[in-house]
Amino acid sequence: MWEQNIRQVVPYVPGEQPKDENKIKLNTNEFPYPPSPKVLQALQDVSLDSLRLYPDPAVVDLRQALADAYQVELEQVFVGVGSDDVIANAFLTFFHSEKPILFPDITYSFYDVWADLFRIPYKTKALDENFHMRKEDYYEENGGIIFPNPNAPTGIGEGLGFIEDILQHNPNSVVIVDEAYVDFGGSSALPLLEKYENLLVVQTFSKSRALAGMRIGYAFGNKKLIGYLNAVKFSFNSYTMNRTSIAAGVACVQDNRYFEEMVQKVITTRERTKKALQELGFSFPDSTSNFIFATHKSVPAEELFEALKQAHIYVRYFKKPRIDNYLRITIGTDAEMDTLLAFLETYLKGR
Ligand code: PMP
């Protein structure tokens, strides 16, 4: 019975990537506008001949570009193939205790999958009735802590004081703050790096930097912490980042003006969408991310999800306790949000 000796896991299921040509895709929190034109230029500058060679295993160009942009040192930066890769490596490196790691019950649904994959014991902590984390839940002994800030799928961001309180209560474990959505109005834990050597801050190019297709994630920590992370990474696969991703990433980080302008545009659309959804009878926790987690006062979320899909509008629906009457709606372009809102208005009226 060979099946007794294999690792059997229940995998994470990412949001759908529909083939539908006329779709409006608001289901996986991608950025609605293209990346900086400088990224295209950088890709064109990658010579075919250079692809014969392995990329720089230390990815110095991209790490240095990030170090310059965020004013940290090169040795404080780790990069990987999307923040999923960064976080998976961080689980493997930092969560190596018999004690359970802690994370919220409603959160990024990859955390429990990695914990199971790596045989890491874990405990989830229930969000309060308003979907906020309770800091006191993270005071007990643990083997590590991870949470997104802003949280997903709720969109709620906690302040710096909240994060610092958790760090103060946990000098004996690594605290990972997953900042996939922080650029849309959250408070980054980056200023706390100097004070807490057990803090890892993870970010990504997939959301605010419009490069989900390139797969680039990164993390900041103190040099010792990043050193441990690199040792594990280089024990697993040395060359994870390819030359084209590295070139695109460098060009992207260097065009800060474009980045800030486009992020602002999405924030403006989000605020307008919040008002319009409220007028249609939706409510939601106040989002500081590029999505809104909305519930309707009378129409079930699952019904709306199916109706939207019929209309080629894809949003995310999680059939899980406590959140099965919510839709997670990514902020698209103004035109896409107008189509969504018009559809909802007509549908709700005709029901
Ligand atoms: N963290 C959170 C909270 C996310 O929602 C996502 C996106 N699915 C990720 C990490 C991973 O994103 P990526 O691997 O594209 O950087």
Image (cartoon, helix red, strand yellow):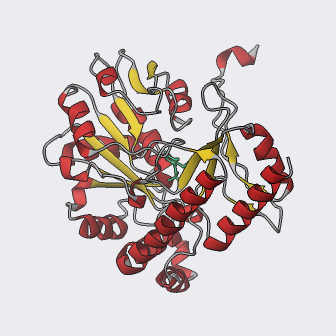
Residue 229 seen from this side: yes
Establish if 242 lies above or below 318.
below
Residue 107 screen position, x and y as percent: 51, 35
| Relative horizontal placement of residue 77, taking residue 3 as reference (left or right) | left
The picture quadrant where one finds residue 178 is: top left
| Relative horizontal placement of residue 21, taking residue 328 as reference (left or right) | right
The picture quadrant where one finds residue 18 is: bottom right
Q: Observer-nearest residue: 48 or 339?
A: 339
Residue 54 seen from this side: no
| Relative horizontal placement of residue 334, taking residue 230 as reference (left or right) | right
**Which residue occupies 39% across, 49% down?**
179
**Which residue occupies 45% across, 27% down?**
127
Establish if 278 lies above or below 264.
above
Tell me the quadrant of the picture where the N terminus can be found. top right
Establish if 49 lies above or below 144.
below
Residue 289 screen position, x and y as percent: 47, 54
The picture quadrant where one finds residue 283 is: top right
**Which residue occupies 46% across, 47% down?**
286
**Which residue occupies 43% across, 53% down?**
288
Residue 33 screen position, x and y as percent: 57, 73
